[in-house]
Amino acid sequence: MKKAFVVLLVLALGAAACFAVVYRQVSRQAEIDEASPADVIVVLGAAQYYGKPSPVLKARLDHALELYDRGLAQRIIATGGQGPGAKFSEGEVSRLYLSERGVPAEYISIENTGQSTMESAAAVAEIMDRMALGSCIVVSDAYHVFRVKQILSERGLTVYGSPRAWSTNDEWVRAKRYARESLSYILWRVGIRI
């Protein structure tokens, strides 16, 4: 009985240490803007409402526009599929929003089938491969950037993270988002795709 307890304790401590290391990586990446010249800006999708971007998606798109206007990339890939009952995909809404603000439609590609970060990132890697693009700037919420960077980097791409500005100064909210993203990253690493 004692031996089983010790084994469980060691496993629990190991899992806690692993979680703490990943949590630190996620939170550290969230504070860094690595925006550098790249082949393309990748904007991760978020909710859209009746063909209009949600506040989260709008903030991501506005940040991508700033990077585009600075001349850091000439192309943009917008991601995001269509939720149940929706008439538009997040990618389509993003393309319309960007083109209405001066980005030529022919420089905007969309990934509009992904229903998760993993699916969207895999589709982006395929799009970039077909277009012979090797580097990207990932735009998403700060807590999300680390995992997306890791997924795309594993596909052989050079990836720079550029998080949009936080919408909250509430440290508890940030901590919860870091924790959720840390768990999502660990699950992805061990082969559980979410």
Image (cartoon, rainbow, N blue to C red):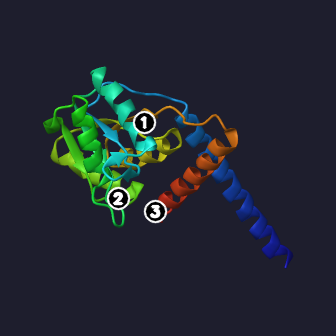
The tag earlier along the polypeptide, 1 or 2, is 1
Placement of 5 over or under 184, stated as above or below: below
Q: Residue at x 78, y 65 (%)?
A: 9
Q: Amino acid at mark 3?
A: Ile
Q: Residue at x 58, y 56 (%)?
A: 183
Which residue bears the numbered disc 2? 119
Q: Secondary structure at mark 1?
A: helix
Q: Is residue 89 left or right of residue 180?
A: left
Q: Is residue 55 left or right of residue 80?
A: right
Q: Note whether residue 27 is visible.
A: yes
Q: Residue furthest top?
A: 70
Q: Which mark is residue 59?
A: 1
Q: Residue furthest right?
A: 2
Across and down, in percent, residue 155 comes to 32, 49
Classify 10 Å Cα crowding around label 3: few (below 14), some (14-19), many (20 and above). few
Q: Nearer the viewer, residue 79 or 10?
A: 79
Q: Is residue 143 left or right of residue 114?
A: right
Q: Residue furthest bottom?
A: 1
Across and down, in percent, residue 77 comes to 26, 42
Which residue bears the numbered disc 3? 194
Q: Secondary structure at mark 3?
A: loop
Across and down, in percent, residue 113 comes to 28, 59
Where, by quadrant of the figure, is residue 37 drawn? top left
Q: Residue at x 62, y 50 (%)?
A: 179
